[in-house]
Amino acid sequence: MSLVGKSLEDLRRQVLCKNFSKSTAMKISLQALEAISDLHSVGFLHRDIKPANFASSLSDELQLIYVLDFGITRKYRNADGTVKVPRAKARFLGTVRFASRACHYGQEQGRKDDLESWIYLLFDSFDIQHGMQWKKVRERQEVRALKEIFFKSKTGRHFSVVPKDLYSIVLYVGQLKYETEPDYTYIRNYLLTTAKQTKIDVEKKFDWTGKVSQAAKREKKEQKQI
C-alpha cells in the first residue's frame, strides 16, 4: 500500500495535462523549501531535488507534498556539527536537468546545491515549457552553460510566467558558498511577499485536488478500450 500519492511529475502530466496554476506552483515551492530546510537541519543533503521526488498526500484534506527518494543523500556535517571539508573531486550525481552547476563541474555539493536544484524546480513548476531552457538539451556541457546564463540574466522566456521579482532569490542562491548556511526564512518570506504583491493566493487548494481519482478512472477506461 502506498503511503503517498502521485509525484508532482505524474500529477502534472497524467492528471492535469497542463501547467500548474501560479497558486499551486508557489505552494509547491514553499513546501519543497520547507522539506529541504528540515532535511538540512538534521545534517543531510538530498542531492536529487526534482518534481519526480516530491509526492502529494493521499488525502486531499492535508494539502501537503512530501520529499522522496533518499538514495543518494549525504551527511554534510561532522560529528561535532562542523561542515565537512569538501572533497577535491566528486562524481556526478542526480538528474542532469535539475543538477546544480557544482555537480556538473565535479565539485562537492553543499546545502546551496539543493537550493539551486530547488530554484530549477520552482521555475519548472511555474512553466513546464520555458521554465528551464535546457530541459530538452541532452549534452551535459550545454546544459551547464545554459544554467550559467540562467544565473546571470533576468531576461528570457523563463520569466514569461514566473514573477520577475523572484530573480532576487536566484541571485541570492547563486552567490551562496559551499559552507554557507542558507537563510531559509529570508527565502520563504520573499516568496510570500512576492505572492502577495502579484496576487498569487497560496491558500487555494492544489490543482489536483479531487481530480486524481477521476484521472485514474479515465485511464482505466482507456486501457479497456485498447
Image (cartoon, rainbow, N blue to C red):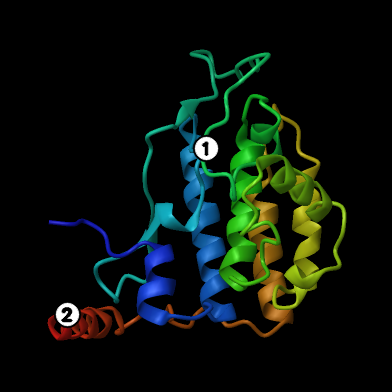
Mark before the other along the chain sequence, 2 or 1 = 1
Any part of residue 161 in sight: yes
Residue occupying the point 74% across, 46% down: 142
Identify the residue at horizontal 46%, vertical 40% (top origin). 39
Q: Nearer the viewer, residue 56 or 152?
A: 152
Identify which amino acid the numbered label 2 is placed on: Lys
Callout 2 crowding tier (Cα within 10 Å): few <14, some 14–19, many ≥20 = few
Question: Disc 2 and disc 1: Cα gap in Å?
Answer: 35 Å
Residue 125 location (% of width, % of height): 56, 68
Q: Is residue 173 above or below residue 132?
A: above
Identify the residue position indicated by label 2 in the image.
220
Mark 2 against mark 1, which lies toward the viewer?
2
> Image point 72% across, 72% down: which residue?
194
Q: Is residue 27 left or right of residue 104?
A: left
Q: Quadrant of residue 129?
A: bottom right
In the image, taking residue 220 as reference, residue 200 lies left or right, namely right
The count of marks equals: 2
Q: Which residue is mark 1?
A: 47
Q: Is residue 202 visible?
A: no
SS class, disc 2: helix
Asked where in the image residue 137 lies, by quadrant, the reply is: bottom right
Report the quarter where the C terminus lies. bottom left
Residue 63 percent coordinates (x, y): 37, 71
Cβ–Cβ under 8 Å for marks 2 and 1: no
Residue situated furthest front in the rendering = 226
* Nearer to me, 211 or 188: 211
Q: Amino acid at mark 1?
A: Arg
Q: Position of residue 38 (x, y in %)?
A: 47, 44
At x 50%, y 42%, the residue is 48
